């Protein structure tokens, strides 16, 4: 019988970066969750193998990962797949969270294919919530970037579902460029988080320079991350339609490349059609205290 527990998929390639991710997992509480330690061992250019070996299946690694404490109500399993690690992680579309390091053991780079993290946010990805972990320290401060899009709303909901979120302080960041949807999105995100019982929720609205909206949004977010030094940045993979879609998409990529902290990106699947305008759903504005800059 398939488990109904929320699944955390940990992409484990045995690297030092993977060790940091595993320590991060151990530094957070996951009551009632299922943690799947997934190893993909086959180089992308190797001959194909049968489906039984190429799809994730249980195995006993020589040095299995162990939960350090408090794991009595957590299911832990080790899975192996002889396939391209990018495709293997892509297959976990129902995962509540994918957790990987920013760099792996170097195989993909040697083949000129780029990093797994870059792949997992390309095109219409990620297919499940993706956390790229750079530090093992417990999450105490979070910077949630919103722009009023459905991707940003989904990022807020995913953050609210993390079992350790109650112990964090969240700042909701919006870069306003004259679009009223930005401030409304900030209000809605703050209201959703407080409705989940969170006490430490603040808002921060920064004015963008209208002459350079494309690059000012990205640079403003990066500067805010540098100034506030949060433990975790949370954002959607793309923003509102047209130009803004490209802007926030490039921002997510830029944050992954340049931020010194961990980054959580909400999935793009099942939202693309809605965000393209096939469904226009707007939540009423919340009444919340805002800190405006600019």
Image (cartoon, grey):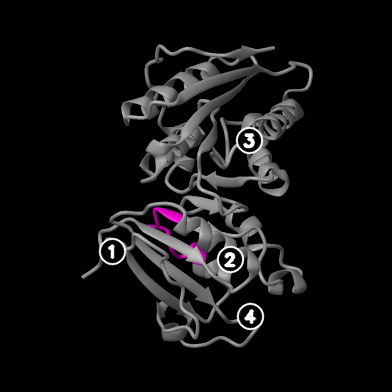
**Left or right: 86 with respect to 10?**
right
- Of tags 3 and 2, the one toward the viewer is 2
Helix, strand or loop for disc 3? helix
Residue at image point 70% right, 74% down: 107
* CA distance separating discs 4 and 1: 35 Å
What are the residue bounds of the magenta stretch?
A: 89-97
Picture quarter with the N terminus: bottom left
- Of tags 3 and 1, the one toward the viewer is 1
Q: Earlier in the sequence, mark 3 or mark 1?
A: 1
What numbered label is drawn on residue 43? 4
Q: Can you say whether 261 is above or below 274 in the image?
A: below
- Of tags 2 and 4, the one toward the viewer is 2
Q: Earlier in the sequence, mark 2 or mark 4?
A: 2
Q: Nearer the viewer, residue 189 or 269?
A: 189
**Residue at mark 1:** 72
* CA distance separating discs 3 and 1: 40 Å
Q: Earlier in the sequence, mark 2 or mark 1?
A: 2
Place of residue 146 in the rendered image (x, y in percent of width and height, measured from the top left)? 54, 29
Q: Can you say whether 192 is above or below 76 in the image?
A: above
What numbered label is drawn on residue 18? 2
* CA distance separating discs 3 and 2: 28 Å
Q: Earlier in the sequence, mark 4 or mark 1?
A: 4
Extreme residue toward the left, this view = 1
Q: Can you say whether 103 is above or below 82 in the image?
A: above
- Check contact, mark 3 vs mark 4: CB within 8 A: no
- Check contact, mark 2 vs mark 1: CB within 8 A: no
Q: Mark yes or no: residue 32 visible.
A: yes
User: Is-magenta flag for residue 70?
Assistant: no
What numbered label is drawn on residue 248? 3
Q: Can you say whether 78 is above or below 252 in the image?
A: below
| Other residues around mark 1 within 10 Å, as few (<14) / some (14–19) / many (≥20) | few
Residue at image point 58% right, 61% down: 20
């Amino acid at each position: 019988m398939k488990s109904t527990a929320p699944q955390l998929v940990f992409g484990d390639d045995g690297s030092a970066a993977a060790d940091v991710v595993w320590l991060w997992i151990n530094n957070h509480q996951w009551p009632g969750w299922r943690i799947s330690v997934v190893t993909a061992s086959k180089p992308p250019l190797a001959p194909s193998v049968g489906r039984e070996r190429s799809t994730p299946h249980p195995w006993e690694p020589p040095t299995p990962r162990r939960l350090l404490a408090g794991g009595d109500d957590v299911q832990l399993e080790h899975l192996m797949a002889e396939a391209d690690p990018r495709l293997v992680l892509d297959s976990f579309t129902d995962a509540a969270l994918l957790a990987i390091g920013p760099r792996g053991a170097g195989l993909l780079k040697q083949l000129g294919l780029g990093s797994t993290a870059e792949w997992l946010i390309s095109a219409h990805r990620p297919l499940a919530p993706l956390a790229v972990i750079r530090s093992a320290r417990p999450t105490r401060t979070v910077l949630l970037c919103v722009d009023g899009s459905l991707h940003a709303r989904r990022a807020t909901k995913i953050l609210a579902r993390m079992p350790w979120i109650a112990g964090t302080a969240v700042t909701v960041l919006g870069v306003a460029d004259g679009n009223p949807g930005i401030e409304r999105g900030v209000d809605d995100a703050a209201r959703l988080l407080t409705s989940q019982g969170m006490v430490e929720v603040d808002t921060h609205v920064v004015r963008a320079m209208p002459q350079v909206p494309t690059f000012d949004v990205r640079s403003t977010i990066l500067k805010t991350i540098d100034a506030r030094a949060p433990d975790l940045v949370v954002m959607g993979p793309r923003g509102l339609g047209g130009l803004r879609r490209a802007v926030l998409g490039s921002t997510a990529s830029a944050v992954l490349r340049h931020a010194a902290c961990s980054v959580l990106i909400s999935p793009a699947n099942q939202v693309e059609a809605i965000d393209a305008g096939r469904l226009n759903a707007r939540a009423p504005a919340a009444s919340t205290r805002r800190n405006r800059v600019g």
